[in-house]
Amino acid sequence: MGMDSAFLLIWTETKMANYTKQLQKIVAEYRLSGQSWPASTKSIADWAIGSGRWSLPASAAAQKCAEDISRAMREEYATDAKGRRVRIKHPASLKRGTEQLVLWDDIRTAPRSHMLLSFQQRRQQIVGDCRQLKTDVDSYNDAKQAEDPIQMIFDFSRDLAELEAA
């Protein structure tokens, strides 16, 4: 990674961290203002926009559109020859030169290399989600030792078998 791309990566990560902090501050202000809590993100967003705390910069329109397209592609399904509901579009993150890209392909036409990478990355996301869930449950149980601990089972074999049998 060259000096310019390393600087750009650090700058981008810092910018996103600052933006995240700003959004977290908006949530805190929402709660302090006496708004309904618990709340939906839509309610918080409506309040943030209405109170002038957040607006979409013109430069963010393409990013917002890309996110919406990504969400739409994730929700595109078809039924395969055995009657299974299958996601059609699959992303794979890869690096081309100094640029990090997420490329989408269609399961019906994608090369094996793309699908292998996509499936591996999705599995890692699931493992990361499970790790965070375990950390959250462990912390909750530690803080509430007077109560029965909440148990989490991370072996999904039975769940998958039941879903496949249904």
Image: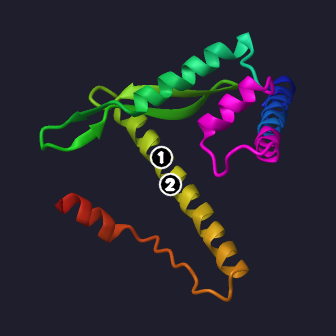
Q: Count the numbered circles shown.
A: 2
Dominant secondary structure, magenta? helix
**In the depicted view, which residue is nearer to us: 84 or 110?**
84
Determine the image quadrant of residue 83.
top left
Instruction: Determine the residue positioned at 82% across, 36% down.
Output: 22
Instruction: Determine the residue positioned at 62% across, 14% down.
Output: 62
Kind of residue indicated by mark 1: Arg
Q: Are marks 2 and 1 in contact (CB under 8 Å)?
A: yes
Magenta highlight range: 24-53
Is 101 placed above or below 30 here? Answer: above
Kind of residue indicated by mark 2: Ile
Is 61 placed above or below 98 here? Answer: above
Kind of element beneath mark 1: helix
Asked if the magenta segment contains residue 52, the reply would be yes
Instruction: Determine the residue positioned at 27% across, 39% down.
Output: 86
Q: Which residue is mark 1?
A: 122
Is 74 on the left-hand or right-hand side of 6? left
Q: Which residue is mark 2?
A: 126
